[in-house]
């Protein structure tokens, strides 16, 4: 799970930094079975070619961001990251967000079209529009990236920790 989260975070940060043109993953499959040898355990698949969680996360990330253009970073560290991508043809934005701590909160504007949230493995959650309850919807997120898809013009407003 950790490799999956870090893979998505790394790729999105690289794109959103505007400093890196290409990324190549070290190796497709693990080199062997020595669990405590980091060089042997960095593949997206195990040595027998069974996919790891990172493989699934990579597939979801490529589908979620395919054909989309980076627009801006509403938050770019050190604690919270929220990177906005747009699809001009569909008229929708995709936000990729996570925190470098166990939890963080942000408000994301919601419209009558509603919002759709996906986790790093593609599990979908629909947030319908309600002017009072979800007009400026609070989103909790943590160390695992989430994708928030909605109409063009989505904006992330990060809120400080509530102090619970």
Image (spheres, rainbow, N blue to C red):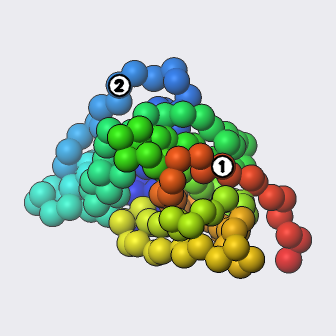
| Placement of 75 over or under 58, stated as above or below | above
> In the figure, is residue 82 to the left or right of 122?
right
Q: Which residue is mark 2?
A: 22
Please name the residue shown 46% across and 75% down the image: 125
Q: Where, quadrant-wise, is the C terminus in this rendering?
A: bottom right
Q: Are marks 2 and 1 in contact (CB under 8 Å)?
A: no
Residue 155 at x, y percent in the picture: 66, 49
Q: Residues within 10 Å of mark 1 (few under 14, many from 20)?
A: many
| The N terminus sits in image quarter | bottom left
Percent across and percent down for residue 68 are 39, 39
Q: Who comes first in sequence, dot 2 or dot 1?
A: 2
Residue at position x 48%, y 57% from top? Answer: 149
- Estimate how packed mark 2 is, as few (under 14), some (14 to 19) or many (20 or more) residues with alpha carbons within 10 Å: few
How far apart in space, not on screen, are marks 2 and 1 (Cα)?
A: 27 Å
Q: Residue at x 31, y 47 (%)?
A: 62
Nearer the viewer's eye, disc 2 or disc 1?
1
Furthest-left residue in view? 48
- Element under disc 1: loop
Q: Is residue 21 left or right of residue 115?
A: left
Percent x, y for residue 70? 49, 34
Q: Quadrant of residue 131?
A: bottom right
Instruction: Please count the marks in the image.
Output: 2
Residue under pointer 1: 155
- For image coordinates 15% across by 63% down, the residue present is 50
- Circle 2: element type: loop
């Amino acid at each position: 799970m950790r490799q999956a989260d870090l893979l998505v975070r790394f790729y999105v940060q690289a794109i959103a930094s505007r400093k890196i043109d290409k990324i190549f993953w070290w190796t497709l499959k693990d080199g062997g079975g020595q669990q405590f040898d980091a060089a042997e355990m960095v593949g997206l698949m195990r040595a027998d070619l069974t996919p790891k969680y990172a493989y699934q996360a990579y597939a979801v990330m490529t589908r979620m961001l395919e054909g989309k253009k980076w627009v801006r970073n509403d938050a770019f560290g050190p604690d919270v990251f929220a990177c906005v991508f747009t699809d001009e043809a569909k008229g929708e934005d995709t936000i990729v967000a996570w925190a470098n701590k166990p939890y963080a909160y942000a408000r994301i504007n919601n419209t009558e079209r509603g919002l759709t949230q996906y986790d790093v493995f593609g599990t979908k959650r629909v947030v319908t529009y309600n002017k009072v309850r979800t007009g400026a919807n609070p989103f909790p997120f943590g160390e695992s990236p989430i994708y928030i898809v909605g109409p063009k013009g989505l904006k992330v407003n990060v809120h400080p920790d509530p102090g619970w």
